[in-house]
Image (cartoon, grey):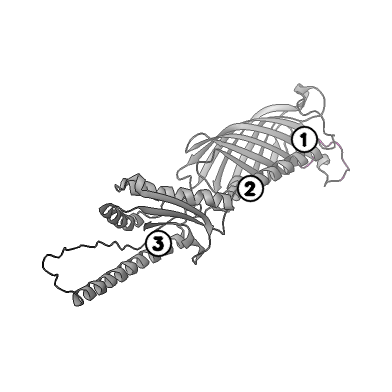
Amino acid sequence: MKKLLMVLALASVSVAGMAQSETPEMKYSVATNSFWSNWFIQANAVGTSFFNNGEKWSNPIKDYRTNLGASVAIGKWFTPGLGLRTKVTGIWGRSVISTDKETNASKYWQVNEEVLFNLSNIFCGYSDTRVWNFIPYIGGGVGRNMSYNSYGMGLNVGILNTWRLGKHVALNLDLSMGGHEADFDGTSMGGGQSRWKLENKDRTLNAEVGLTFNLGKSTFNKVPDVDAIKALSESQIAALNAQLADANAENTRLNNLIKSHKCPETGAKTVTVKEVAAAPVSVFFNMGSANIASKKDIVNVQALAEVAKANGKTLVVTGYADSKTGSAGLNQKLSEKRANAVKKELVKLGVDESKIEVKAVGGVNDIAPIAYNRRAVVEVK
């Protein structure tokens, strides 16, 4: 028993350790769905090994203590990391009173209510396309041995592993251990011993294989990145203010030219000076993402692209990430991806790729709030 608990604990620690190595930028918040969303049903074939109360742990695959059965369950995920499941298990069992499997044969059922903890979503962030989910659980319920007309309350712990086969179907591997009151299997071996020791209860080891079917809406929606939305609004206002300032400056320059204008002497050559004035444009991104948060940013980029094309100018795209999330190495790569994402948009707008320079700064904290640093800046060189 101690060895089994140690294996379960080590498995949980290993998964937690792998999960914590992920950068926080991989996580995002989700909105809680309605009561009728995120329900699922499961159907499994079950192999069970039975141990009587007072019996020492021994070879669990002996035929006089093992039998096949089935289980069905219905459950719901209230959040990506927390769910409840009601499971019914049973049909064929063993009351281990001898080493003869026919003598030990019995029929039983048990109903458990279980709390599920999806550690993959809790530690690694929710993903509706994740292939493998690691889900420890704990529960309790009641069982009945129909052959001996006896009942017993019980507790169980286990690990549910699911592998995604499609949007609504997953493969299950469920490993669990249960402990019930001593008369669950219709016998009372080991009477008079401490009721609190697991060895003095009727115990089961279960291995289940089957399918999970998700009903209706089975995913969670992302919560909008409020900081990014705010940054987007601020950037649009800043761009308009910059354009207005440029227009005022141009008007002042033209007025000064008019005031200081002198008629050219006869035969003098007229020289036209062409100047380009364009404010830098920022394109914003959500945390941990290299996908442009709003296509509205491309409208401002398009205006800058037209100026560059008309005047043969080079555009410089500089990518940034915020320094508060992720390591320096990951932020460097993320800022580069963001710059290249904007470069692709400029190429779509007709800018010659040779006229685009890409720079990646990495994680910075130049602008407050921190979300404003998740950006790429386009400017005329």
**Above or below for 11 versus 280:** above
Residue corresponding to mark 1: 186
Specify start and end residues of the magenta stretch as a single range.
Answer: 180-194
**Above or below for 195 versus 264:** above
**Above or below for 337 versus 236:** above
Task: Say which residue appears at 70% left-offset and 31% top-offset.
Answer: 48
Residue corresponding to mark 3: 232
Q: Answer with mark 3 or mark 1, whichever residue precedes in sequence.
A: 1
- For the residue pair 236 and 11, the one nearer the viewer reads as 236
Q: Position of residue 193 (x, y in %)?
A: 88, 43
- For the residue pair 331 and 159, the one nearer the viewer reads as 331
Under circle 2, the secondary element is: loop
Q: Nearer the viewer, mark 3 or mark 1?
A: 3
Q: Amino acid at mark 3?
A: Leu
CA gap between label 3 and label 2 equals: 31 Å
What numbered label is drawn on residue 371? none
Under circle 3, the secondary element is: helix
Query: Residue farthest to the left?
Result: 266
CA gap between label 1 and label 2 equals: 49 Å
